Image: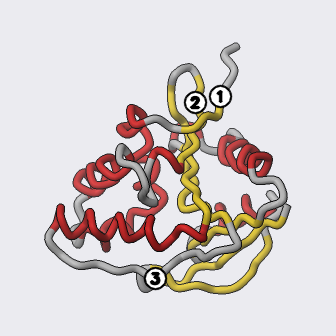
């Protein structure tokens, strides 16, 4: 049986990871590009993914791969770097789409922030999300890990609570309220 592997993403993973990222944050991407076009939104994420030093870069992404198929992804970074990482995204929006955009900072210094955790619809419920989280917890031993979970995603919240995350506070992002959960290792 082929062993699943968790590894850091490479630029060539873009066509597989961008749709996963989009699945986890479609509303936010639509707000960034100011259009509700799924294909354009995925193209936007692919173009950022292959670049370095932005929130959605391959450099900040772990992938879960089995039999050469990417079935899950986890995008994370040090919260202390949110300003330059998000600034790069806003600059990209301005040069690519011609409009200024700003979103609230979803994290801050003192935590590693999980921007998106996503599992392919055909592979959900098989422990892939948990495996990615366990891998990250192992990698960031001794650090605080934070994330935002949508109020209308109780399944995701249940997974995070089961994985040891606890409720910290509420945060607004792109005009919507989210629960800020943290994990202290």
**Mark 1 vs 2, N-terminal side:** 1
Q: Position of residue 37 (x, y in %)?
A: 23, 60
Q: Position of residue 147 (x, y in %)?
A: 64, 68
Which residue occupies the foreground of this view, 62 or 155? Answer: 62
Residue hosting label 3: 104
Task: Check disc 2 and report its element: helix, strand or loop.
Answer: strand
Q: Position of residue 55 (x, y in %)?
A: 45, 60
Tell me, what colour scheme is on the image? Answer: secondary structure
**Mark 2 vs 3, N-terminal side:** 2
Cα distance, mark 2 to mark 3? 32 Å
Q: Is residue 77 left or right of residue 102?
A: right
Q: Is residue 77 above or below residue 135?
A: below
Quadrant into which the C terminus falls: bottom right
Crowding at dot 1, Cα within 10 Å, few <14 / some 14-19 / many 20+, comes out as some
Residue hosting label 2: 65
Q: Is residue 3 above or below residue 127?
A: above
Crowding at dot 2, Cα within 10 Å, few <14 / some 14-19 / many 20+, comes out as some
Task: Check disc 3 and report its element: helix, strand or loop.
Answer: loop
| Residue in the picture at 23% in, 72% down | 34
Cα distance, mark 1 to mark 2? 5 Å
| Residue in the picture at 58% in, 75% down | 107
Residue hosting label 1: 5
Q: Is residue 85 above or below residue 14?
A: below
| Residue in the picture at 73% in, 62% down | 160
Task: Check disc 1 and report its element: helix, strand or loop.
Answer: strand
Cα distance, mark 1 to mark 3? 34 Å
Q: Is residue 183 left or right of residue 16?
A: right
């Amino acid at each position: 049986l082929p062993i699943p592997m968790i590894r850091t993403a490479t630029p060539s993973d873009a066509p597989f990871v961008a749709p996963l990222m989009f699945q986890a944050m479609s509303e936010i991407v639509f707000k960034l590009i100011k259009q509700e076009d799924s294909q354009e939104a995925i193209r936007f994420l692919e173009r950022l993914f292959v670049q370095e030093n932005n929130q959605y870069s391959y450099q900040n992404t772990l992938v879960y791969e089995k039999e050469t198929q990417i079935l899950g992804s986890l995008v994370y970074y040090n919260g202390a770097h949110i300003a330059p990482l998000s600034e790069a995204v806003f600059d990209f929006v301005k040069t690519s789409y011609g409009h200024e955009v700003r979103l609230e900072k979803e994290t801050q210094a003192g935590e590693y922030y999980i921007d998106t955790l996503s599992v392919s619809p055909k592979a959900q419920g098989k422990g892939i999300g948990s495996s990615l989280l366990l891998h990250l917890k192992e990698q960031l031993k001794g650090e605080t890990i934070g994330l935002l979970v949508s109020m209308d995603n109780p399944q995701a919240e249940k997974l995070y609570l089961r994985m040891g995350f606890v409720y910290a506070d509420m945060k607004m992002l792109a005009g919507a309220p989210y629960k800020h959960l943290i994990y202290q290792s």
